Amino acid sequence: MKIQPFKTVILTHPSDSGSILKEGLFKLGLNVIEDPMIDTIPMQLSSADFKLIDDAEVLILTSKRGAAELIGQCGADRLQGRFIICIGTKTAQELLNAGVRANWLPQGQTANQMCDELLRNKLVHGKKVTAVVGQLAEPTLHQALHQICEFSRVDIYQTIDVKSSNPFTIQALEQTNPPLVCFTSASAVRSFAQNYEGLFSASLPSVSIGPVTTVALNQLGFKPLVTTNPSTYEELLKQITVLSSKKMLNVR
């Protein structure tokens, strides 16, 4: 089915992240609705968690939020001199803002891609490794690394669904020319489907930040126009820019 290009983009990620995407969409002249479908809250580290962090020869951080919480609960001094692996420059920058430098960043932007690189470069082979992640993180790291290192996981923040609807989103969904919905997590996909049930069809134009998010979309009947690679806000902006320039869009 062909539809006219969108004039409105709905952002479903927390408003304190992805500012480069929002600013870029404004520059394109698009109407932007910020409608966060998830929120995160800290999880207090236990004495056992602190021991896993202190005893680790390698710490793995997979998100900016995880890095911020680790700094907040451990303090920068406790992390000085540690060997730290970060996924993404924004995660590493969060550490650097507190005076802590990451030692290695994978070329890939996902946990799967990082694991592939670690299996090849043997950076963690035979070492005590602790991954500091969100509670809903997939067991990707454990599955890939537990046979080559002494792997542990510490959950440092919890993702919660936002159980409310935004009147501006409802209005946009009711328009003849549908908006583009931007999804950056599987949790946001599920929350959006619950909050706006009955107000959209599977043909609603959407874009996905990566394969895990796309799987969640597919399970609910969505077929995103784009799944970005790499999985970054910068790539999302690039792909949305391309879509917005088209005279017609093909939705499935």
Image: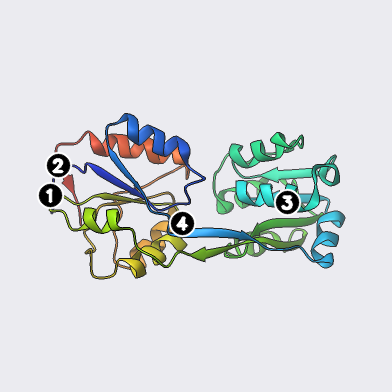
**Between marks 1 and 3 in the image, the one whose residue lies nearer the viewer:** 3
The amino acid sitting under disc 4 is Ser
Q: Which mark is residue 248?
A: 2
Residue at 73%, 51% in the rendered image:
70
Give 59 or 68, whichever is nearer the viewer: 68
Q: Nearer the viewer, residue 30 or 5?
A: 30
**Sequence-first tag of 3 and 4:** 3
- Residue 177: x and y in percent read 15, 49
SS at circle 1: strand
Residue linked to disc 3: 70
Q: Amino acid at mark 1?
A: Lys
The Cα–Cα distance between marks 1 and 3, rounded to whole angstroms, is 47 Å
Q: Position of residue 17 (x, y in %)?
A: 51, 44
| Three-letter amino acid code of the residue under disc 2 | Met
Q: Where the N terminus falls, by quadrant?
A: bottom left
Q: CA distance from mark 3 to mark 4?
A: 21 Å
